[in-house]
Amino acid sequence: MTLLWTRSRKVRLHRKLSIIGMVCTLIAASGCSPIKPWVKPYERQNLADPIMSFERDQVSAKYLHHVYDTREAARGAEGAGGGGCGCN
Amino acid sequence: MHAFSIFTRARASLSTAFSFSIILSTLNKMLEKITLVVNLPVMKLLMAGLLLVSIGTHSAVLPEDRADIMYHGYDGDGVRIDGPSFLVRKNIADKVSVYGNYYTDQVSGASIDVLSYGSAYTEERNEYSIGADYLYDKTIMSLSYLNSDESDYVSDAVSFDVSHDFFGDLSTLSMGFSYAEDTVGRNGDDSFSEEAEHKRYRIGLTQVITKNILMNVSFETAADQGYLNNPYRQVRFLTGDGTTASSKTELYPNTRNSDAIAVKGMFYLPYRAAIRADYRFYSDSWGIEASNYELRYIHPLKEVAGLTLEAKYRFYDQTQADFYSDLLPFEDATNFYGRDKELSTYTTNMFGIGASYELKHPWLSFFDKTTINAYWDYIQFDYENFRDMTQSNDGSFAIGEEPFFNFDANVLRFYISFWY
């Protein structure tokens, strides 16, 4: 029973991945012409504003990530890190 | 010698990482040739779908020349940790940007873990890091070295990262690798010395979605091996008829593998302000699953030129490690055992506010820009299966029936930044 269930789950996952893969490919390859950048350079003044930086100040962001790293079990995918234990 | 050994051992992996830039240019060439991929297996389809977006040209930019002087302070659970941090960054010939960072933690007081089994103490941790970013056409390659030193813990780490801009400045693909080697000691016990090593691999894609939206997806996998315990922490177990307890040093598995995936977004509002939204999911081989959410609002004030205000909220929750136990039923109940509160089930809520102000004064004209910044964060920790055993030490509660532990912490950051 468990084997059947695992198998059907795998088949469903396989189908989902196939569909996602095909959609990505079709969107990207549609019309045999590459997708062109849709935000022109002259439209990027808002994106260039310093307030749109994910982290404006590295020294400050690095410290806060160190606080998270020492107080939480989770780590990674946050962009900054530190060393040492600092566990107590 | 120790640092040299790190570099030597990491060399093989770094040479692999150096090939990232070659891979990127190869991918661009491959894309031009791919016309029909419908019959490829599932994984190839997924890869092709992702790769087809990497077309276009753009020049990457090195970080700005700046220096930061920061005071940081953490105060919570009876512990105070504070100190300075200095960061200086300088471009050389617009090709290389080098930086150096010195950071110190001065620790004093006694947390719940120390109060349960020991007494208050003071300690200092010093961290030095240096790094260089090399700009080559649309690619930035970064190499850094970090040394962290305290009386009972020494860590050396090297990192290598590559980021590549493409698709007309709308996409940035980044990849990186870090290797760290730690030596763990125990104060008061010169014969105790253990080793641990940590490897991390990461990949991320930053994408401009619209002229007001920027998104980033990052994935990082980590592999630790060696002595991963905290040598001071203890686990307690019931003895006799179950009304008394004793304790022994924790024992963790000597490997740990974890995966984390994060999605971040920056949204420019109809007026001059921005919102940052984050989500991260984490899972590891110790059975811990965690997720965190964050919302940040950044608002430059029109009325006061140069003043930017910020407010944020962050929520974090995690499940316990498989081998975590607040109170073991008997001494040898499990093969591995830990009572570290960071391995228990708990949540945190964090509220933060801050301000940044651009100083303008004739004697600061030597600099292109000078800002003064202050941030305060308040964090509430609520543990769901970690009990405050100090309450039974003094006889207020029976063993195993103490109230669950919780505490609040304040985190301060105050710094001055100079651009030149």
Image (tube, helix red, strand yellow):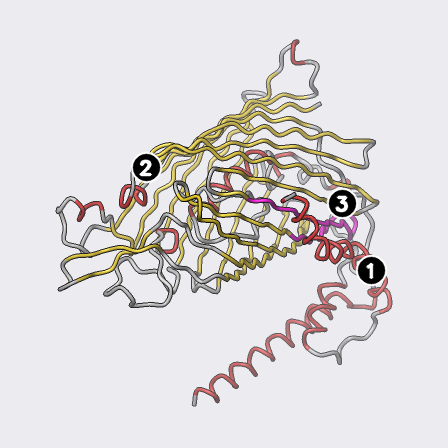
Chain of the residue under the numbered disc 3 shown in the image: B
**What x and y, as percent, mark residue B296?**
50, 41
Bin the neighbour count of mark 2 within 10 Å (Cα to Cα): few under 14, some 14-19, many 20 and up.
Answer: many
How far apart marks 1 and 2 lie (CA) works out to: 56 Å
Discs 1/3, front:
3
| Residues shaded magenta | B155-177
**For this rendering, which residue is in front, B403 or B267?**
B403
**Membership of B341 in magenta stretch:** no
Q: Residue at x 19, y 61 (%)?
A: B239
Which residue is under mark 1? Answer: B28
Q: Label for residue B110?
A: 2
Q: Residue at x 35, y 51 (%)?
A: B341
Residue type at numbered disc 3? Ile
Q: Earlier in the sequence, mark 1 or mark 2?
A: 1
Which residue is under mark 3? Answer: B140
Whether residues under marks 3 and 2 lie with C-beta atoms below 8 angstroms apart, the answer is no
Whether residues under marks 1 and 3 lie with C-beta atoms below 8 angstroms apart, the answer is no
